[in-house]
Image: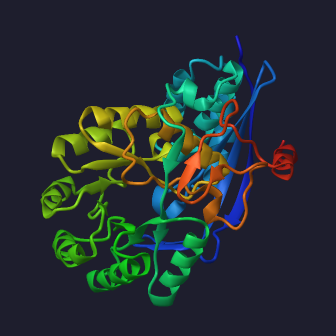
Amino acid sequence: MSKIAAIDTAQVHLRAHPDLVVQGAKGAHDKSDFLLVRVMTSDGITGFGEVSATPLWSGEDGTTAEHFVRRIIAPALVGAPLTPVGALESTMDRLIAGNPFTKAGVAIALWDAYARTLDVPLVEALGGPYRREVPIKLSLSGDDEHLRKVQAAAASAGFRAFKVKVGLGVDGDVRRMALAREIVGPDGFLGVDANCGWTRAEARRAIRLLAPYDPAFVEQPLAASDLAGMAELRGEGFPVVADESVFGMTDLVRVVEARAADVVSVYVGKSGGPGRAVELGRTAAAFGLGTLIGSNGELGLGAAAQLHVACALPELTTEFPSDIIGAHYYAEDILASPLDSDGRFVRLPDAPGLGVRPREDVLSLFEEKS
């Protein structure tokens, strides 16, 4: 039986592509500190994962994640059987409260190693594939010339579907959406994402004023805990997407009971790993909720995990593109070979595990930390 022989980490610090920086209700996302995770097994198999965390949003970052992985998680998991991966995830839960993005980085590496041990793509280990490509979108933010610059850069990368960052003041939100609609045209796909930035009164006013610009959906219009308010907004004519309101299964149950959303944005990071993300998406579907894959600005390894999860879900809301943006968002990629993405779709790699691996110079960072 394959056992975990070692777990190590390497930090990577990257800035967003200057023309694509997201400015939302929770601040600007212009850089990210990632923690890469490597799991090595007794059979000589290596799996890779990625902690994609931002302190402002999740309370986690590469430094806190590295401490937890090296000092607490690795000593507990090394020597344990690689399977079942779910048991290893439960061990992490007993060791550390919260910190789902940190646990997800380790879980991605464990699932990658497990699928490589089986010599199958991760999507097959997760129960798929139900599809081999996923439609994607990119966020538009800022005002006036900045928004035009972001959209032009996104369009040059192939993107044709977008969501506009709002929740920064209703009047400015409406002007931003009006400009975005003008730029992408009457038939272009546009949703809006408030990132918890509106009060109930602001949300009702904003939705009424945004209606002429035909938003495809309204994402997280209210505070994560205001499920009653979100349920009321579902009657305003546009699908409501729950994002910050749903991290794990307990949150999903609350959203279902409150009838607070039409669609749930599932993250590999929020869920605590690929297996749990698939479980969350399947449960949402069982209760009649749509599912899309949300983003915390993942790099190549995280984006690959997002993609495998999306393709392992029996029901994915493909009319609302997912947020698997990967290296499009950053000034450089860390993968030896990038994911196959043209801005409209991202496609599964045909290789075991995640189907991707870091560049050689990135791999050398693990050796420096050992």
Residue depicted at x 59% and y 54% = 298
Residue 78 x/y as whole percent:
70, 25
Residue 99, can we see it? Answer: no
Residue 281 x/y as whole percent:
38, 37
Between 130 and 275, the residue placed more toward the observer is 130
Residue 186 x/y as whole percent:
34, 74
**Residue 107: which quarter of the image?**
top right
Q: Is residue 370 left or right of residue 208?
A: right
Residue 187, can we see it? Answer: yes
Between 309 and 279, the residue placed more toward the observer is 309
Work out whether 128 lies above or below 31.
Answer: above
Residue, far top: 1
Residue depicted at x 63% and y 77% = 18
Quarter holding the C terminus is: top right
Residue depicted at x 53% and y 29% = 89
Residue depicted at x 60% and y 37% = 108
**Residue 16: which quarter of the image?**
bottom right
Residue, far bottom: 145
Q: Is residue 98 left or right of residue 200?
A: right
Quarter holding the N terminus is: top right
Between 102 and 364, the residue placed more toward the observer is 364
Q: Is residue 336 left or right of residue 183?
A: right
Residue 332 x/y as whole percent:
73, 63
